[in-house]
């Protein structure tokens, strides 16, 4: 882990509660655009078969996303709470400020003690 990655993660961690625009994601590369910045999820490579989030860092800023969404959202930190079908989830959600629709959840599902799992899910909005 580099000094830059640590600084980027600290930047991300201080954004809890902030409102900004969500502009889509790339599920395969675990990247998304929020607040005018492309963010990338980094898994913990040293964790063997388990799957935990290590860092949220700046991604490739000229990335384009197929599921372009433009929604004003609020970033909310979640600590060991149920989120959708995950009993024990820690991470973040991006929720629409107008109707509370969850656009994106990113974090770690700890429901299975032996094998936690990184969660990165986009939820399209029904029109």
Image: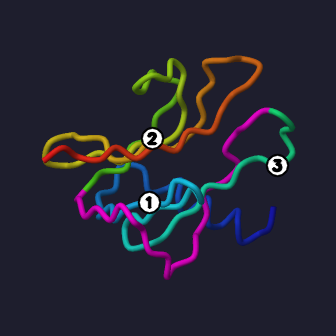
Q: Residue at x 29, y 47 (%)?
A: 124
Pointer 3 local density, CA inside 10 Å: few below 14, some 14–19, many at least 20:
few
**What separation in Å lies between label 1 and label 3 (alpha carbons)?**
22 Å
Q: Is residue 5 left or right of residue 89?
A: right
Of the numbered discs 3 and 2, the one sitting upstream in the chain is 3
Residue at the bottom extreme of this rendering: 62
Task: Return the x and y of residue 68 as percentages of the image width and height.
Answer: 32, 65
Task: Return the x and y of residue 8 as percentages of the image width and height.
Answer: 61, 66
Quadrant of the image containing the N terminus: bottom right
In this view, 78 is above or below 114: below
The residue labelled by disc 3 is 45
Q: Is residue 114 left or right of residue 14?
A: right
Of the numbered discs 1 and 3, the one sitting upstream in the chain is 1
- Circle 2: element type: strand
Task: Return the x and y of residue 72 as percentages of the image width and height.
Answer: 23, 59
In this view, 111 is above or below 20: above
Q: Main secondary structure of the magenta part?
A: loop
Give residue 77's mark.
2
- Circle 1: element type: strand
Residue contact at pointers 3 and 2, CB within 8 angstroms: no
Q: Residue at x 63, y 24 (%)?
A: 110
Task: Return the x and y of residue 103 as percentages of the image width and height.
Answer: 33, 47
Residue contact at pointers 1 and 2, CB within 8 angstroms: no
Q: Is residue 43 left or right of residue 121?
A: right
Q: Which residues are magenta?
A: 50-72
Of the numbered discs 1 and 2, the one sitting upstream in the chain is 1
Q: Residue at x 58, y 69 (%)?
A: 58
**18 magenta-colored:** no
Give residue 25's mark.
1
- Circle 3: element type: helix
User: Which picture quadrant has residue 21?
Assistant: bottom left
């Amino acid at each position: 882990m580099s000094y830059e990655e640590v600084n980027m993660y600290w930047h991300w961690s201080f954004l809890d509660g902030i409102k900004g625009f969500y502009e889509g994601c790339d599920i395969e590369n675990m990247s998304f655009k929020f607040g005018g910045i492309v963010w990338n999820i980094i898994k913990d490579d040293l964790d063997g078969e388990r799957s935990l989030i290590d860092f949220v860092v700046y991604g490739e800023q000229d990335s384009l996303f197929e599921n372009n969404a433009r929604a004003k959202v609020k970033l909310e930190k979640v600590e060991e709470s149920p989120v959708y079908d995950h009993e024990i989830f820690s991470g973040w959600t991006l929720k629409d400020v107008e109707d509370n629709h969850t656009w994106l959840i990113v974090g770690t599902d700890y429901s299975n003690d032996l094998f936690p799992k990184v969660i990165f899910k986009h939820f399209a909005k029904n029109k």
